[in-house]
Amino acid sequence: MSPFVERIASDEHLPRSADVVIVGGGIVGVTAAYFLAKQGVSVALIEKGHIACEQSSRNWGWCRQQNRDPRELPLSSVAMRLWDGFAADLNRDVGFRRCGLFYATDNEEVLAQWAEWHPFGLANGVETKMLSAAEIAERIPATQRKWIGGVSSPNDGKAEPAIAAPVIAEEARRLGATIHQGCAARSLDIANGRIVGVHTEKGLIKADAVLCAAGAWAARFLRPHGISFPQAGVRQTALRTKPTVDVGSCLYSPDFAMTRRLDGSYTLAISGKATIDITPQGLRYAREFLPQFARRLKNVRLAVGRSFISGPESLSAWLTNNDRIFENNRVLDPEPQQWLVRKILAGVRSTFPELADIEVDSVWGALVDCSPDAVPVISKVEQVDGLVLAAGCSGHGFGMGPGIGLLAAQLLRNDDPCVDPTPYRLSRLVDGSKLVIGGL
């Protein structure tokens, strides 16, 4: 089942040309469109399904600086300021609240990781506080376990995945961008090593610049053009409850993570527990991902399933150059993993007695597109002048999305970047550079 996401109308006519074409209507694509349109740049955003139909509506909604990889922290700080600014700049609320994030654990190794990050965060302006077992006990009366400590970040917060990208897309349109849903990009039009347009299922759009913000589909979209982007999908699961009692806004624990939504329901998920499907694309990039997956193997399951024969990593996607594959897969909607649903609900119910009878509204699967070092790619593509890639967000794309969109827009326009883009360059993944795996 797909999660609920607000639907918006499409522009009726495909333009013959635009200054920039954006491939992908997730949070990165729509924020890039918004920032470009604010500059008076003509933008056509094309999306094979509908705005935010994949990962941008399937995430936790967290917007944070706490526990960020050092390479991501500058951009996440930019993103937080942009989320703040949306309250004044947009015509509608996107649900952004600096409600604070709260972490609790009974794992000594995890607590040590948080404690190691803590002085780094303080030195870089993050408001972060280590919590003792007694402070945790005041916040979460332990029923299943005794928390040994935690951390809080009062300036971090959340936004609403169901409405954020659609609202921003509508604002981009008000500023002059055009939005084309149900319109798959089939391929790039390249002449003499530079972008001259994009072929879509509804016709050619001429353009001098393209942003590929295609999420889990990015590697497959670029491959026929001789561009290698090591990318792997990790299958995760989340659920939404019916509106219920308020036990806090945003909480992370070893057994579950929870985010209170605007209507009083909760999004529930779990960090680090997932399934990696064995796929042709996965086998192609196995060497690049081996260090990361070896480090995290105890928390994931390996499987062979539907992903082997359908979707962006499938046999049909990688053994042919069929440019109709995108329109034949309008919305990537993996099956939720019921073992994870049971684990998440057990953790929540045992921790909060008042949620013992919590009711589930909907359950969905997601495919999180990852890079080999778990750091996004936001980069000009050296082989093709005028092409920028923004993908591989590794589960961090929603909260960092406005910052990623802004940086991508600046790269497209050759403007001064909001942060140093070097850590996000595509070449690090393909030129033999030694990779440091990010994330906590």
Image (cartoon, rainbow, N blue to C red):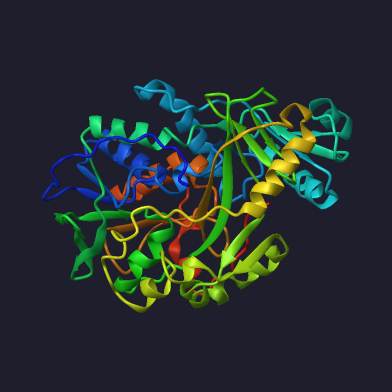
Residue shown at the point (37%, 74%) measured from the top left: 316
Position of 205 with respect to 60 (left or right) is: left
Depth order, front residue of 433/306 = 306
Regarding residue 394, the answer to whether it shows in the image is yes
Residue shown at the point (66%, 62%) measured from the top left: 300
> How many numbered marks, from 0 up?
0
Above or below: residue 163 compared with residue 424: above
Residue shown at the point (78%, 49%) measured from the top left: 110
Q: Residue 175: image x %, image y %? A: 24, 31
Q: Residue 336: image x %, image y %? A: 55, 52
Above or below: residue 144 compared with residue 439: above
Q: Residue 79: image x %, image y %? A: 49, 37
Q: Residue 91: image x %, image y %? A: 34, 22
Above or below: residue 148 compared with residue 424: above
Position of 89 with respect to 19 (left or right) is: right
Regarding residue 118, the answer to whether it shows in the image is no
Depth order, front residue of 105/423 = 105
Residue, far left: 16
Above or below: residue 408 compared with residue 251: below
Position of 367 with respect to 66 (left or right) is: left
Residue 203 lies in quadrant: bottom left
Residue 158 lies in quadrant: top right
